[in-house]
Image (cartoon, rainbow, N blue to C red):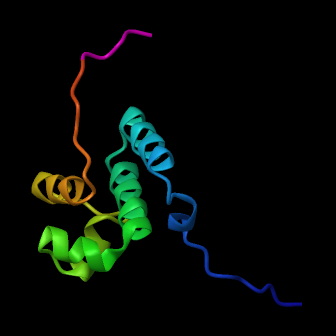
């Protein structure tokens, strides 16, 4: 018996801005750069990579590579992507647990 696999893209479940914000907040809170890159990639795909390509001035392939789980985007790339997504980084003192 063979197992049939279907294509799955989590971007389909992150169409709403509230869900996107929650995903990014979780990625930042976890402190994992790969997770943050991946979360930005999910949101970029949810909003449309063709539009991201136009808004960032970067090639789609470069965006896919940089925003993969194993990607290592530069700060400049992160800032371009955030600007294209109409998002910003807010820095606050960390609250002690």
Picture coordinates of residue 87, whole percent (x, y): 26, 47
Q: Quadrant of residue 57?
A: bottom left
Looking at the rendered structure, the number of numbered marks drawn on it comes to 0
Picture coordinates of residue 33, whole percent (x, y): 31, 47
- Residue at image location 27% in from the left, 75% down from the top: 51
**Does the image show residue 69?**
no
Q: Quadrant of residue 81?
A: bottom left
**Does the image show residue 82?**
yes
Picture coordinates of residue 36, whole percent (x, y): 35, 49
Q: As drawn, which residue projects farthest toward the right?
A: 1
Q: Quadrant of the C terminus?
A: top left
Q: Left or right: where does residue 13 sit relative to residue 3?
A: left
Q: As drawn, which residue projects farthest toward the bottom?
A: 1
- Residue at image location 48% in from the left, 44% down from the top: 18
Q: Left or right: where does residue 34 sit relative to residue 7?
A: left
Most foreground residue, 51 or 89: 51
Q: Which region of the structure is painted magenta? A: 93-97
- Residue at image location 25% in from the left, 52% down from the top: 86
Above or below residue 45? Residue 18 is above
Asked if residue 7 lies in the magenta stretch, the reply is: no
Above or below residue 1? Residue 25 is above
Q: Left or right: where does residue 54 sit relative to residue 87?
A: left
Q: Quadrant of the N terminus?
A: bottom right
Most foreground residue, 30 or 55: 55
Main secondary-structure element of the magenta-colored stretch: loop
Asked if residue 96 lies in the magenta stretch, the reply is: yes
Picture coordinates of residue 42, whole percent (x, y): 43, 62
Q: As drawn, which residue projects farthest toward the top?
A: 96
């Amino acid at each position: 018996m063979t197992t049939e696999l279907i294509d799955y893209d989590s971007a389909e479940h992150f169409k709403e801005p509230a869900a996107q914000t929650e995903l990014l907040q979780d990625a930042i809170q976890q402190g994992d750069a790969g997770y943050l890159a991946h979360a930005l990639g999910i949101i970029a795909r949810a909003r449309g990579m063709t539009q991201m390509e136009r808004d960032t001035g970067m090639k789609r392939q470069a965006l896919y590579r940089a925003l993969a789980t194993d990607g290592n985007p530069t700060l400049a790339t992160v800032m371009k992507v955030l600007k294209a997504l109409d998002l910003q980084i807010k820095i606050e003192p960390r609250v002690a647990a």
